[in-house]
Image: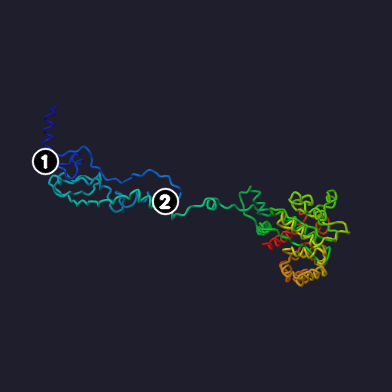
Amino acid sequence: MPEPADKNARATAHNAGQPQTRRRRDLRRPAGASPDARTGTMPAAATPNNSRTAPTRRSSWAEAAAVADAQAETDTGAGAPGVSGVPGSSANPAAPAAAAASPAAAASGGEATVPSPVPASTPARPAAQPATSRRATVPAEPSAPPSNATTRQAAKLAAADAPVSDFITGPGSFVREQKPRPRGGFRGALYAMTGGTINLGPGPRQREEDELGRRISRQLQGSYNTAVLSLKGGIGKTSTTVGVGLTLAEYRGDAPCAIDANPDSGDLVERALGEGIYQQSSPRTITDLLKNIESVDSLTALARYMHHAGRLHLIAGEQDPEVSDSLTAEEYLRIRKLISGYYSVALTDCGTGVTHNAMSGILQSADNLVIAAGYAVSGAKRARSTLQWLASHGYEDLARNAIVVITDKDEVSSRVDKDAIEDHLSGICRQLIAVPHDRGVADGDLVTLDVLKPETRRAYKEIAAAIVDGYV
């Protein structure tokens, strides 16, 4: 076995004819240093400035977001070395390694050259071939990052111009609008069978019903009064007052009030409560209220003289024929003034005719009118006569804005042309609404919404919506 000295001698002779290769320590030698100068560390490559200032508490979310955006632009903007496409940065990822010059160039004192990057798998060039080189590009001096004062100033300007999200008044951007639940019909059945998974929304008829409810329930500023009158009895005046009053009570947030000002022993309360219930209760009337009106200073005190059909509050008319016709216009105005302090909507059942004592006070305080009519020839003619009388006696605005309600109470014969009667009256009023024949109205007894036909209830909704339309 040969000695180690002989092995070292042969290795030295073999290496004598090979080109000198750069050793690892030469790679650690900085550019421009002599070959004998040795360093123990790699030259520090320029790295992006990732230092961040300590977070500052901001007065609003928008300002804090603007500061964060400004800081992000500072980190990735001009002057950040090592980012492609940014001035002052090198596009070549091997630029930090190329900053170190070759030992030969450093030894000769010549200009530093940077060899092209060679993949690790490519073999080194032979010494006989001249190595091509390109002049090392000296990167431009990076621009100084903006100062903290400049960053804060830019953040303040950005925060002032940035729109602030309104999370309170604009929740629609976070929550999807939910379709209303369909009621009845195919849509309602499908909604019920799928447990609400499939919701097609309300149909056209339900949307119309919902729109009527919205019109009825509108908030009112002040107190308003609607008078229901006719020149002929027995054509649905009192039943219309009760049906519309109950509809208003169903949809409005505030309870309406109905006043029986019929001089001929009106039966408004009996139609709303039923004859038996009214007789069992203490039958306080409008006459009792007038006697003690000075002591009524609250809604609690007024409730002693009121009757209640659900949320509909009623003032009963006088039942004694000897005093029923004694209500004057001044007394009615006192009642109306008292009611206006506690109720936003009032209905007044005026009875038959327009010439009795209280009528001038009723018309003086009325905001709109409901003229009751029927499909009989006499009923249509008297409704037209009522409107003509109003227009010729200083109530032209009330006549022009009146609502004519035609009730098919007696189910007239087929010989009556209903369309002709409607055309005859529709041109001289604001709106004409027809109430179909319904035994719950025609019997002359208790009127409750539960027993009425859907068409009758819809007609009362239309009347109630038209009344509120006249208030706003």
The residue carrying mark 1 is: 17
The numbered mark, 1 or 2, whose residue comes first in the sequence reads: 1
| Residue 274 visible in this rendered orientation of the protein | yes
The residue carrying mark 2 is: 66
Which residue is farthest front? 294
The location of residue 79, given as percent across then percent down, is 30, 51
Mark 1 → mark 2, Cα distance in angstroms: 67 Å
Residue type (three-letter) at the residue carrying disc 2? Ala
Quarter of the rendering occupied by the N terminus? top left
Seen in the image, is 168 located left or right of residue 17? right
Could you classify mark 2 by the number of other residues whose Cα lies within 10 Å: few (under 14), some (14-19), or many (20 or more)?
many
| Residue 91 visible in this rendered orientation of the protein | no
- Total of numbered circles in the picture? 2
Q: Nearer the viewer, residue 465 or 331?
A: 331
User: In this picture, is 193 found above or below 403?
Assistant: above
Q: Nearer the viewer, residue 266 or 186?
A: 266
